[in-house]
Amino acid sequence: MDYREIKEKRVFSLVYMARQLVTAGMIDGENYVLNADMLSSVVEHYVQDLANLKSRYGISGKANSAKVAGLMAGALMRYRPLLPVNGRAGIASNDGNETLAIYHGLAICAIQSDGTINYEEIKKFVNNPKFGEWLDRFKYLLGNRNYTPENLAFVFDTVGSFIFSEVDLEKNGD
Amino acid sequence: MNTLPDMKEYLDALSRHEAKPQGNPNHSEDCSFEAFKAATDCLVEAVSNRKRV
């Protein structure tokens, strides 16, 4: 898969995730919109980061799912493609971009090595009493603190490796 | 001049992509996107149900 195809794939995955989160009311679709210009910047930045990472670690094939999730989350936080419709809207309290980055990464890392999904495991993870607090802390990290895309990859690596039992992160990726 | 695609173009492209016949095991990218969609739908549904509890 070349970088043009990877860019297209990531645009589709982001648009799909954003659409589902808006439909479910988890992102404020009334007041926020996914900006096409920013979305293009996200995927351009992502593929450059991906190429750099592969060069740094001598990866000749695909980078694993956790790296994809982390680098994409980093690119999303850099460009924040969900923008308010109203130019005077306050944006400090809106965490739509953080929500998009986290769920996009989780979905990538929940795909099992045989290409299927374990619905029960995902539901168990989400229904864990500590999930809400973990999510809030992850959003705070993304929106307010310091990190690198590779730090985020390690967060997703932990989730993919220890939460989902049949996931082999090396089987998927870009 | 802005040559970047409009958001509607992305959504239209996504619709075309979704409308493609699925289930061809030789087309790994479609399978990968289908798996991503399934994971997304499961996550969103699970969180939505959790919020109502």
Image (cartoon, rainbow, N blue to C red):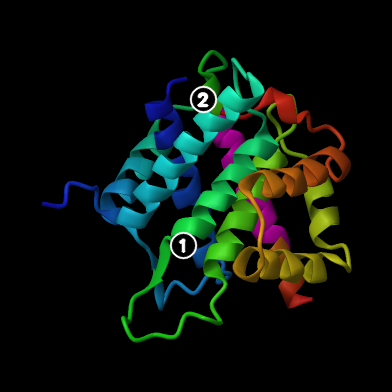
- Report the residue at 51% width, 55% height from top: A76
The answer to whether A32 is drawn above or below residue A39 in the figure is below
Circle 1 sits in a helix, a strand or a loop, which is it?
A: loop
Graded by Cα atoms within 10 Å as few (under 14), some (14 to 19) or many (20 or more), the crowding at tag 2 reads some
Disc 1 marks a residue whose amino acid type is Arg
Q: Are marks 2 and 1 on the same chain?
A: no
Q: Is residue B1 visible?
A: yes
Residue A90 appears at what percent x and percent y? 44, 85
Q: Please tell me whether the stretch drawn in magenta is mainly helix, strand or loop.
A: helix
Q: Is A100 left or right of B18, judged from the image as shown?
A: right
- Residue A98 badge: none
Question: In front here: A127 or A73?
Answer: A73
Graded by Cα atoms within 10 Å as few (under 14), some (14 to 19) or many (20 or more), the crowding at tag 1 reads many
Disc 2 marks a residue whose amino acid type is Glu
Q: Is B3 left or right of A71, judged from the image as shown?
A: left
The answer to whether A152 is drawn above or below residue A137 in the figure is above
- Report the residue at 65% width, 27% height from top: A172
Residue A92 appears at what percent x and percent y? 52, 81
Disc 2 and disc 1 in contact, CB within 8 angstroms: no
Pinpoint the chain carrying mark 1. Answer: A
Q: Which residues are magenta?
A: B32-46
- Report the residue at 47% width, 80% height from top: A91
- Report the residue at 77% width, 41% height from top: A157
Question: In front here: A71 or A171?
Answer: A71
Q: Which residue is mark 2?
A: B29
Q: Is A100 left or right of A169, judged from the image as shown?
A: left
Pinpoint the chain carrying mark 2. Answer: B
Q: Which residue is mark 1?
A: A80
Circle 2 sits in a helix, a strand or a loop, which is it?
A: helix
Residue A125 appears at what percent x and percent y? 83, 55
Residue A86 image-quadrant placement: bottom left
